[in-house]
Every structure is written in C-alpha cells, then in structure tokens.
C-alpha cells in the first residue's frame, strides 16, 4: 500500500511538471535521424529496409530535468533472462526423458536468408538455446539474392522430414521475396512460430485453440503472469500491429480478458492512449519512442522492441536498445522489462517449448487406437489433448482422461494437457461460450482464464503446485506474492489460476 501511494504522488507532481512538455506531435517522440521522416510516412514498409546497424542516440530526448529529479521510485525489473533459462532447463529435462523413453528428440529447422546482422545474432542465440536443451537444430542459409523457389524447397524438405518438428523462417525476408507465399508453404503442424493463418485465426476466435501461440506474445504473457500481474479486466495497450508481435499480442491479451487498445503508426496522440494503460506492451522498433510521460504511474511496461545500435565500447561492437526509454519509464512504472534481458530470451524459450510440444504431438498419431507400442504408451496421454484440439469426439479418450490412468508414469502428466482434457462442464456464467463440443478451452501450456476443472484433476494440480513451489524456492513465485500483496491461494480462490508452462 505504502509503495502504491509513493508511486501515485510521484506521478501527480511528475505529470504536472511535465504537462507542457508532452508533445502532441509524434515526430518529437521518434528519434531524430535522417530516417525519421520515412518512418513517419510509412513505418511498416520502411521497417523492412532497416539497415543492420543504426546510429542513434541511446538516451532519451529533452525530458525535463525536474521530472527526472522528482522520480525517486524505480520499477521492479522483470528478469526475462532468468525465467527463460529456467524454462529452457525444464525443456532440456523433458527432452532427456523423451530421449531415454523413445530414443528421439525434437528437431527444429531454421531458414535464414541474407546477411542481416541482427537476424544472424538472433539465429545464433536460437542455435545456442537448442544445444542447451538437447533439441536437434539445422540451419539452412541462403544469400540475399536467392529465389523464392529455393526457399520454398528448403521448407518443403523440412516439411517432409519427420525428424524436424518445428520450422522457422527468420523474418524479415529480403524484399524481393514474397513472405506470404513462402510462409504458406510451411506445414501447419510444424509452424512453431505460430504465424500460420490457421494458428492466428484460432488464437483470435473464442472457444478455439491454436496449435502454437506465437513465441514473443506468449513470452510476454508468461512474464506478466510469473510476476503476478493480473491481466483480466485490466486496460492493456499494445503499440504495433505486426503479425509477429502486435497483432498476436493483442489477441492473446484478449484471451486473458484484458481490455485491449492498439496503437499504430497512424494513431494520433498515442501518449494519451498509452497513459491509460495498466499494461503497456510496445513492439515497434523505434528506439526510445515510449517516454516516461507515456506511462501511467504504476503500470507494467513490456518492451519488445530490439534495436542494434553501434557501440564500439561493447565487445560485439553493438548493443541493443528497446522502444521504451528505460531511464524515464522505470521511474513511473511498477514493473518493467529491460532490453536486453527481457522479452528476447523469452521468445527463444517459447520457441523451444513450442518445438517440444510439436514433437510430442507428432508422436501421437494413433489417436484412438489402443496403446500398442512404447511410443504410443508414452504419448497416449497427449493424444487426448490432440483429439480435443481438433475437436473430434472420442468418448474413450474422455473417460481415460477423467480417470487419469495412462498418465501415472509418464512425464506428460506434468504438461497441461489435463486442462484440455477437462470433461465438459459448462463455464460458469458464460452459457454462450459453451458450444456443443464443450467449454472454452484454456490455452495449452500457458495460463488461461479460469475454467472449472474435474475434482480429480484439480487435486493433481494442487499437489504439483505445492511440490513445485518447494522446488522453486526463491523463484519468481515469490514475486507473485510480493507484487499484489496477495498469497497465491487468495488469488486462486478468486479464480486467477497460475498454469505455468510446466505445471
Ligand atoms: N524481443 C523479441 O523477442 C522480438 C523483438 N522484435 C522487435 O520488435 C520490434 C517490432 O518488430 P515487428 O513487429 O516485426 O516490426 P514491424 O515493422 O513489422 O511492425 C512495426 C509496427 O509498429 C508500428 N509502428 C511503427 N512506427 C510507429 C510509431 N511511431 N508509433 C506507433 N506505432 C508504430 C507499425 O504500425 P503500422 O502497422 O501502422 O505501420 C507496425 O505495426 C522490432 O524492434 C523487432 O526487432 C520482434 C520480434 C521479437
Ligand atoms: N520467424 C521469426 N520468428 C521470430 O521470433 C523472430 C523473427 N522471425 N525475426 C526477428 C524477431 C526478433 N526476435 C528476437 C529473438 C531473440 C532476441 C534475443 O535473444 N534478444 C536478447 C539479446 C540478443 C543479443 O544481443 O545477443 C535480449 O533481448 O536479451 C531478440 C529478438 C525474434 N524474431
């Protein structure tokens, strides 16, 4: 409480001092290089042309010194790197178990076109993470001037190779290549990026569940929930509407019952909108665009933007900066992600998680057939989830699921397929959501809106939760208590169930 009051008082004086300095012209809030006019005219197109390394000032402009001095409060930092490492090490454990049980590991195929320096860095990070997790990785590289057919053929090779369960085409592609056409070739079941229209459509539609949720939005929401940020009923503002970041982030936040507003390059007075946000997520690619004065006091700020800028003092000759002027925003927000070390590592962790999920699903082909061999025994539990996902009817699966029988000795019992398998109980007070196929399905593998659960499954979940809390002593769960001044049980009683990626 004391903490909250402190933030409020800072804000009031901050805003008053600041009123005249809040610009109504967006150009002032973007950076002043020779490129900013182009950005203002056509941001989404120009963004494809971005040079590998920008030269731009790393600090924010002209924030009044009185404002800076008034702000004593510093937001708590969301440590995406630490959480990503935990998730990756859990993925690694699952991969090891999988390998022991059936002698196979998940595989990820990556296609990289061109020499963009930042793309190379991101791909290198993905390779490193796959190595850590024991996931098989293959990189197919093409030069800038390759043809569409060459890229499509490489995707098709991964499509038919059963040892690859995920395929990722690193974006952006050079402009002469048709991104839509190329991504259309990618097999839905291997779309671990979640960019396929079917995945995106299912994410958007109530009562449906995508096979894969795009990694960056999933990473953002994972961070919010792990830090105890309540999403339901909150005002969220997403800056940007790209297929990779803005659009799926806004959809995912809606799935978590936030009231979402989207700010684009054409939005007038964006700061007036962002200032209303309890949760502000920016995925634009304009360094330091989000000033302290754009942030509501006590808000949670998630910076997706990553921009390499030349810095000869850094070992690699560059460093990354985000969309948010961290120095200013951290004096207004209650929680904030840094760049680097925030969303970026989470994107990679979620990619590995999706790849693991994809491998698991690929080995459950014998949907309703009796459990016959080792693989099917191992994955039989998962196949229920798959059937539910495709919303076909399988009474045998439902009864297995309720009894929880086949789960007893597999690692799958730790994955959230149980939630998917929840027998059809109407969602309380939301009759319209209950289609003939059953209740609205929670998002697999991440946190979902509260759903009634079968008692037997509930008991399993609670046991696991307690075990995990013990294991994770000093973990982010602690933050969960701290941040909202509520215990986890209190939150659960209200229905805000945590379903960690590995719960
Ligand atoms: N950390 C991570 O894991 C990831 C980071 N990124 C980073 O996120 C950023 C965005 O990436 P991506 O979505 O692919 O980029 P795009 O260029 O595809 O999209 C940018 C979006 O930002 C909007 N925009 C541009 N300028 C402004 C402005 N001045 N005010 C408001 N909105 C604006 C555009 O609006 P409009 O549609 O109106 O043109 C567009 O929707 C980049 O820095 C990228 O590197 C991306 C993916 C993962
Ligand atoms: N098909 C596709 N899928 C993507 O997910 C995708 C893409 N294309 N194109 C580009 C964006 C960008 N992106 C990042 C991933 C990791 C970091 C990351 O690891 N960042 C580290 C630091 C990176 C470093 O400097 O080493 C951090 O922020 O701490 C950043 C950005 C994924 N993207």
Image (spheres, helix red, strand yellow):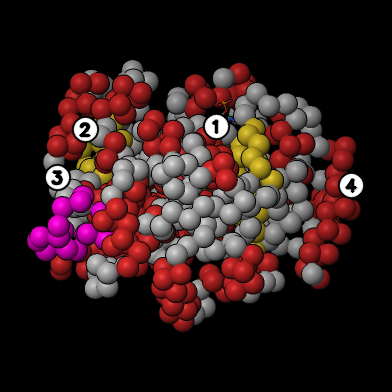
* Residue, far left: 373
Dividing the picture into quarters, in which one does residue 487 lie? bottom right
Which residue is pictured at 65% across the width and 23% down the height? 266
Which residue is pictured at 86% across the width and 59% down the height? 9
Q: Earlier in the sequence, mark 4 or mark 3?
A: 4
Is residue 90 found left or right of 153 in the rendered image? right
Is residue 413 found left or right of 76 in the rendered image? left
**Residue in the foreground of this view, choosing between 37 and 56:** 37
Residue that carries the numbered disc 4 in the rendered image: 17
Q: Secondary structure at mark 4?
A: helix
How packed mark 2 is, by other alpha carbons closer than 10 Å (few <14, some 14-19, many 20 or more), is many
Q: Is residue 201 visible?
A: yes
Q: Is residue 313 visible?
A: no
Which label number is shown at residue 155?
A: 2
Residue that carries the numbered disc 3 in the rendered image: 162
Is residue 447 found left or right of 183 in the rendered image? right
Check mark 1 vs ligand 1: CB closer than 8 Å? yes or no: yes
């Amino acid at each position: 409480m004391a903490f909250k009051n402190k933030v409020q008082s800072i804000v009031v004086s901050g805003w008053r001092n600041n009123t005249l300095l809040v610009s109504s012209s967006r150009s002032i809030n973007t950076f002043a290089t020779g490129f900013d006019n182009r950005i203002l005219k056509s941001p989404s197109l120009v963004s494809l042309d971005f040079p590998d390394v920008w030269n731009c000032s790393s600090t924010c402009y002209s924030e009044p010194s009185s404002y800076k001095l008034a702000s004593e409060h510093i937001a708590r930092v969301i440590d995406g790197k630490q959480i990503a490492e935990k998730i990756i090490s859990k993925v690694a454990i699952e991969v090891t178990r999988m390998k022991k049980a059936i002698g196979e590991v998940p595989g990820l195929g990556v296609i990289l076109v061109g020499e963009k320096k930042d793309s190379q860095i991101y791909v290198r990070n993905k390779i490193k993470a796959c190595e850590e997790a024991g996931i098989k990785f293959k990189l197919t590289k093409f030069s800038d001037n390759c043809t569409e057919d060459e890229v499509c053929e490489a995707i098709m090779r991964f499509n038919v190779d059963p040892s690859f369960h995920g395929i990722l085409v690193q974006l952006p592609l050079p402009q002469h290549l048709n991104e839509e056409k190329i991504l259309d070739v990618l097999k839905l079941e291997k779309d671990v990026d979640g960019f396929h229209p079917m995945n995106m459509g299912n994410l958007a539609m109530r009562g449906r569940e995508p096979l894969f949720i795009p990694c960056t939005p999933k990473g953002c929401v994972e961070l919010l929930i792990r830090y105890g940020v309540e999403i339901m009923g909150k005002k969220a503002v997403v800056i940007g509407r790209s297929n990779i970041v803005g659009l799926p982030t806004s959809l995912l936040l809606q799935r978590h019952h936030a009231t979402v507003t989207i700010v684009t390059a054409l939005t007038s007075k964006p700061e007036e909108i962002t200032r209303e946000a309890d949760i502000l997520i920016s995925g634009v690619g304009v360094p330091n665009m989000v000033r302290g004065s754009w942030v509501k006091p006590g808000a949670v700020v998630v910076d997706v933007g990553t921009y390499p800028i030349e810095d000869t003092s850094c070992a690699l000759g560059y460093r990354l900066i985000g969309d948010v002027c961290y120095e200013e925003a951290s004096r207004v927000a209650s929680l904030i992600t840094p760049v680097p070390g925030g969303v970026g590592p989470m994107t990679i962790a979620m990619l590995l998680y999706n790849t693991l999920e994809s491998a698991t699903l690929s080995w459950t082909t014998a949907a309703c057939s009796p459990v016959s061999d080792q693989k099917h025994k191992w994955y039989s539990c998962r196949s229920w989830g798959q059937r539910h996902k495709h919303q076909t009817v399988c009474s045998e699966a439902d009864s297995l699921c309720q009894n929880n029988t086949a789960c007893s000795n597999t690692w799958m019992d730790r994955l959230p397929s149980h939630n998917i398998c929840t027998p059809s109980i109407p969602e309380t007070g939301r009759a319209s959501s209950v289609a003939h196929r059953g209740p609205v399905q929670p998002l697999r593998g991440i946190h979902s809106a509260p759903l009634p659960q079968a008692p037997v499954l509930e008991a399993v979940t609670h046991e696991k939760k307690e075990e995990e809390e013990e294991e994770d002593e000093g973990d982010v769960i602690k933050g969960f208590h701290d941040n909202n001044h509520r215990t986890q049980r209190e939150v659960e009683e209200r229905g805000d169930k945590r379903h960690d990626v590995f719960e």
